[in-house]
Image (cartoon, grey):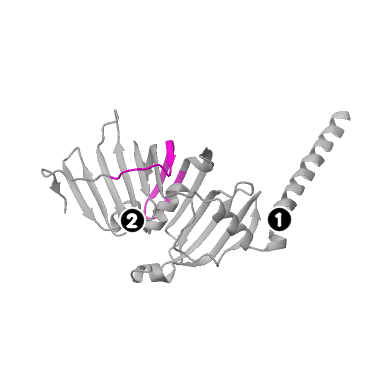
Amino acid sequence: MKYIVLIISLSALIFSSCNTQRKVIRQPLRELGDSIVFAKLKQNELNYTQFSAKFSASMRIDKKQSSVGGQVRILCDSVIWVSLSPALGIEAARMLIMKDSVKFMNRIDATYMVSDFAFINNYLNSGFDFDMLQALLVGNDLRYYENNQFKASVDNGQYKLHTLNRHKLRKFIRNNADYDKVLVQSIWLNPETGKIQSLHIKELDKDNKKLEAVYENFLDINGQLFPQHVEYKISAEKEISILIDFSKIKINEPVTTPFSIPANYSKLN
């Protein structure tokens, strides 16, 4: 009987604690509305102009598995530079991603390629643009999309932001594809840190294509939190899963993005 009383007491205490926590999380929503959650997200995003890190990654495309290591460097809103080193730290390939172009060179085959952003989307079966890609890499929200369409709620101890109708800001629209793209998006935030814990994105009327991202193991880097472990899942014609572990993370320290194609490299069509 004593054990039963103890179990009931502990259960009541846990329930009361969880109920109190839910009330504390919901209170700002009741008082200030949906905008308070989105403001918390923006206030706690990674604030950077330059970023660099080493990474190890594993990728599964359908049933095919591969692993790679390397470095990534970002000049915010300008360049994403990636160096790939499958083994022994020897660089095998290098990529330079900009808003309108992608350059890739294969040091093993002595070949190179110059393309538009479609190269990334064709490889990942996605509908990314540069803004999306850099945001997904560092765990931030999209910079060039509307911010006033979100509704906030509490979901499993986290804040949830959801919108069915997020458009690219008109001043950043470059073509019909940008104009026609409408995002259905959900974002889950840690109520204490304001950092994105996970998100789902898909394009309206394109149910067969969606992306999920999960951010874990946040590290304090010069007073800012950054996720050491990230998992992406892309559902499209192929199922793609990418796991990334970051190390030697540097924020707002000078970086270079060298990309020089040797004269003897052959261009791929």
- Tell me, for residue 193, which label it has, or none: none
> Quick one: label 2 or label 1, which is nearer the N terminus?
1
Quadrant of the frame with the C terminus = bottom left
Image location of residue 17, percent across then percent down: 77, 43
Question: Does the segment drawn in magenta span residue 248?
Answer: yes
Q: Residues within 10 Å of mark 2 (few under 14, many from 20)?
A: few
Answer whether residue 18 is visible to the viewer in this image: yes
Who's the residue at 45% across and 53% down the image? Answer: 211
**In front of the other: 67 or 93:** 93
Give the labeled residue for mark 1. Answer: 26
Left or right, residue 55 beside residue 36: left
Secondary structure under the numbered disc 1 in the rendered image = helix
Q: Determine if the magenta segment contains residue 265.
A: no
Disc 2 to disc 1, C-alpha distance: 39 Å
Residue stretch in magenta: 231-257
Q: Badge 1: how crowded within 10 Å, few (<14), some, or many (20+)?
A: some
Residue 65 location in percent, x, y?
35, 38
Mark 1 is on which residue type?
Answer: Arg
**Which residue in the protein does label 2 denote?**
121
**Picture quadrant of residue 236:** bottom left
Residue 179, image x and y in percent? Answer: 39, 71
Indicate left or right for 155 with 132 as reference.
right
Q: For the point 24% across and 48% down, which residue is it?
A: 104
* SS class, disc 2: helix
Q: Is residue 66 visible?
A: no
